[in-house]
Amino acid sequence: MDAAFPALTEMPEPQFVMSAEGHRIATYTWGEPDAPTVLFVHGFASSCRDNWVSTGWVRDLTRAGFRVLGVDQRGHGASDKPHEPEAYGMEALTSDLVAVLDTYLLDSVLYAGYSLGARVGWQLAVNAPEHVERAVLGGIPDGRPLARLQIEQARAYAEHGTPVEDQVTRNYVTLAERVPGNDLRALVALAEGMRLGDADPDPARPPQQRVLFATGTEDAILERSRALAAATPHGDFTELPGRHHFNAPGSRDFRRVALEFFGSSR
């Protein structure tokens, strides 16, 4: 392997944690058990492998001396994939992460989340601040996640193969189908479930920890992400040059600033 392109980290077999309702949540670990732990949480229709392993994050963080704990959120990867929208409220998604930390006997972690994972990380930092020392939140929306997805069209496609007419919905379906093992019906249920209750990040009630926000310069949510950072007392914001919402996790700039941010916590 060329030194300029070091090998990616191998994917271990998942270790399962049970959610409060009995769903299996897949987890993965790399690095020394006594090293500072970074919790990785991926975005919608992605997985730990897709967002964090295949993009070099796990490799770079473990080489820098961190332990990495990765999660496949419910509805994704090797985790259980319920088809009921009620299974995907924000409280359920954050509770899954608390269950993971409790199972691994971790009081507090460094947090790295992208898109949906960033949105869940914001809420975890607000609702359970004792568990989050500091956080990197990439591509975090300031509005209701997946709000532009046309649920009925996506469901008709998932259940009957009906062609999707709405372009935004078609983009999400394409995103979902590109990751092997994705269950489109579960992802449609997630998109619908995220609209139940108060799923928006509240700028009036931001995390109090140090938070690094990072969003691509070509991402339509750039200015809204910047506004969330401005509303966070200890928030910093960085732009990822030339990146849009779906390719930002692969940005070397993103990995570099996150490593610096986590490294300064030592």
Image (cartoon, grey):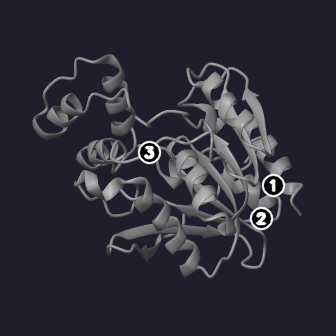
| N-term-proximal mark, 2 vs 1 | 2
On residue 262, the disc is 1
Residue depicted at x 76% and y 34% = 237
Task: Say few, some or many: other residues with alpha carbon within 10 Å of mark 2 (under 14 / 14 to 19 / 20 or more).
Answer: many
Against 128, residue 106 (above or below) is below
Q: Is mark 3 on a helix, strand or loop?
A: loop
- Contact flag, marks 2 and 1 (Cβ < 8 Å): yes
Q: Please state which amino acid type lies under the numbered disc 2.
A: Phe
Secondary element at image label 1: helix
Q: In which quarter of the image is the C terminus?
A: bottom right
Q: Give the alpha-carbon distance from disc 3 to disc 1, as whole Å.
A: 27 Å
Q: Which mark is residue 199?
A: 3
Read off the residue under disc 2: 66
Label disc, if present, on residue 84 of the rendered structure: none
Q: Which of marks 3 and 1 is nearer the N terminus?
A: 3
Give the number of the mark in front: 3 or 1: 3
Disc 2 versus disc 1: distance between alpha carbons? 9 Å
Foreground mark, 2 or 3? 3
Q: Estimate the spatial distance between the alpha carbons at disc 2 and disc 3, rounded to whole Å.
A: 31 Å
Residue 105 visible here: yes
Counting other residues with Cα less than 10 Å from the Cα at mark 3, is it few (<14), some (14-19), or many (20 or more)? some
Q: Is residue 79 above or below residue 1?
A: below
Q: Are marks 3 and 1 in contact (CB under 8 Å)?
A: no
The quarter holding residue 69 reads: bottom right
Along the polypeptide, which appears first: circle 2 or circle 3? 2
